[in-house]
Amino acid sequence: MAALGSRTAGAVAALSAAAWFDFFLTRPYQTFDITASADIETAALLLAVGVMVSQLAARTRKLHIITVTDAAYLARIHRTADLVRSVHSADTVVDHVRTELTELLGLRACRFEYGTLTGRPPRLENDGSVTVGRHTRNPDTDGWPDGEIELRAYGNGHYLGRFLLTPGRGPVPTLRARLVAVTLADQTGAALDTSGPVRGW
């Protein structure tokens, strides 16, 4: 039950197992009365072991989900790194990263601007937080700010361009996803530093 559902479902299943053991297998039968000390110990052990197993199963399920998700994030980073090494066009890298960011962050739109900064939109920072003006905002608790959010790309410490992200209507991406997005922007900066300006974005 815990492997397929939740910790609560597993705990309820363990409680149910102990209750039905009492009802069907202890005297007096078909009642929830229990008098023999051995039967009480057995019911208590059945409940305790059931709860422990359900908690372990739920944790295993959660770790499996985290492992699969982290593997997908790592695959995105590796794909982009391979592309940066194998192509000599920053346009190709920017186009690829735009697609990756759109899928990773559940964006409605994503565009890239090369060159001088204009305006002061909210900015996705290296630690996954968002800066709005002089204030830092935690997307996990405060949600995305309104409008576009910039994600800057640097090469050798120099600003080279930025992605402008338009959040979708779904839930805010996890901190891990936002940190992967920052890494993808850094890889774009490396490509721009090597290949020069992007044309047509």
Image (spheres, rainbow, N blue to C red):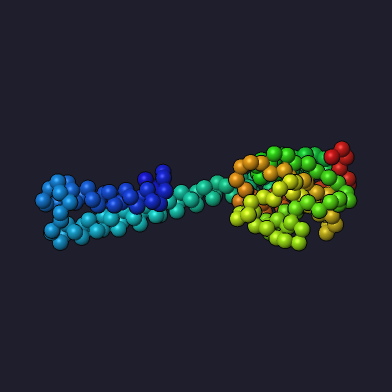
Task: Tell which of 133 and 69 is nearer to you.
Answer: 133
Would residue 181 appear left or right of 72 to someone viewing this image?
Answer: right
Would residue 142 appear left or right of 20 to someone viewing this image?
Answer: right
Image quarter where the C terminus lies is top right
Q: Position of residue 69 (x, y in %)?
A: 57, 47
Instruction: Give the image quarter of residue 137.
Output: bottom right
Residue 47 drawn above or below residue 81: below
Instruction: Give the image quarter of residue 167.
Output: top right
Q: Position of residue 117 (x, y in %)?
A: 86, 52
Q: Position of residue 178 (x, y in %)?
A: 66, 51
Q: Residue at x 15, y 54 (%)?
A: 33
Would residue 127 appear left or right of 195 to someone viewing this image?
Answer: left
Q: Is residue 28 visible?
A: yes
Q: Is residue 25 visible?
A: no
| Residue furthest to the left | 28
Task: Tell which of 14 and 86 is nearer to you.
Answer: 14
Q: Position of residue 40 (x, y in %)?
A: 19, 59
